[in-house]
Amino acid sequence: MELYYNPRSALLFVALLQGLIYTVLCCIRAYRLRRVADLALAGFLFLLTSSLVEYCIGFLGIYDLYPAIRFFPFDHPLAYAPCVWVFTQAILVKEQLPMRVWRWFLPAILQALFQLLVFSLPAELKDTYIEQYHFPWVAGVLYLGTFVFSCWVLILCMRLLKQHEHSLSAGFSHISIGSIHWLRYFLTACLVYTFFDCVFTVAGTAARFSFESWWWLYFIRACLLYYLCFAVYQFKEDVALPQLQLAERVSTPSRSVSPQDIALRQVLDQYMAEKKPYLRETLTLQELAQVLDVPANRISFVINHVLGKNFNDWVNEYRVAEVIRHMKDPAKRNQTLLSLSFESGFGSKTTFNRVFKKVTGQAPSEYFQAIRLSKL
């Protein structure tokens, strides 16, 4: 018997090869930088990659050549969401992950052990189980359990992200919400795929889809793998906060603006102009409140309701203004934009470029070039 080369197996093979390459790259980066997030991403990529093997070799005709490999546990869907949870925790929280986080993988481990048990059965017993028990009801229970479990874990990830976004905008100046938009896109893509997988699986089981029809589910999974490799792997900016700071809430009272609030605004403006605390990258609302001896919720109220901004945007606007002042200073004309941004309180090139364009509507290089031309 010969192998059957066809476009379906080729498309899955390309995604499979790419997934393996990026899995290795993530492992190398995890070892080099000691980053748990890269290790979790490597695990997720490897799981998605291994799940494509079944249909890749199926369309190559390998199952016809070696029927004994039927029911080998290539796919571990119960492990997808836990990998995403560990990845999200590692990205957003500075502290080391507690050992209990690995309990999320217990259902996947039990499923893999069960599949290995069935795989090791003699051919006749294996066929009997698959025809009489697995497809009539075990598969359905497993699909439903996987869907509910995955959605629950992904929703927990979304809640953690929302908590992080609230903390950033309300009390921190060195990380902007825009720096974690990619994580929201990533989690949304995972949720959308989970719903698609559930609908397709239910429809396919009810309609008894052929082996060829099921290929489309794995093709969509391959597309998700392409996205993860090219989009998520590129992220390098540090956005993690300590758990204690992440849990902090700055509650602002629900009331109208008072003369005292207007006076506090003037105090804030004067302090920012004279002392320039925004030049320190890690300036927080709590630190500002401590220096001015004013409750943090009062400062937050003035920034939110008098200035109409959040703390993060308010501080970064001062930094952008400082960069522009440096751009116009002839003594700093030969400095790079990156060095000017660091002098002004920005901590990374990515954040600087994003915030500067948000405030001015232009990229820093375009703005700097316009200033230089105006001086000619």
Image: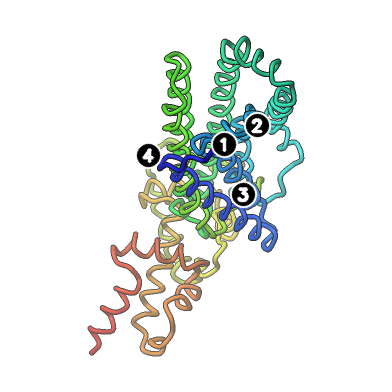
| Spatial CA span between label 3 and label 2 | 26 Å
Nearest to N terminus: mark 3 or mark 1 = 3
The spot of residue 279 in percent (x, y) is 51, 70
**SS at mark 3 in the image:** helix
> Is 46 on the left-hand or right-hand side of 357?
right
Q: Is residue 7 visible?
A: yes
How many numbered discs, if any?
A: 4
The spot of residue 111 in percent (x, y) is 68, 26
Which kind of residue does numbered mark 1 sit on?
A: Ile
Q: Is residue 297 visible?
A: no
Residue on which the image places disc 2: 69
Which kind of residue does numbered mark 4 sit on?
A: Ser
Q: In the rendered structure, find residue 9 and report the number of the disc placed on it.
A: none
Depth order, front residue of 328/206? 206
Which kind of residue does numbered mark 3 sit on?
A: Ala
Do the residues under discs 3 and 2 have CB atoms within 8 angstroms? Answer: no
Nearest to N terminus: mark 1 or mark 4 = 1
Residue on which the image places disc 3: 42
| Spatial CA span between label 3 and label 1 | 27 Å
> Is 43 on the left-hand or right-hand side of 186?
right
Nearest to N terminus: mark 4 or mark 2 = 2
The spot of residue 371 in percent (x, y) is 28, 80
Q: In the rendered structure, find residue 256 and report the number of the disc placed on it.
A: 4
Nearest to N terminus: mark 3 or mark 2 = 3
Residue 26, placed above or below residue 195: below
The spot of residue 100 in percent (x, y) is 75, 36
Residue on which the image places disc 1: 62
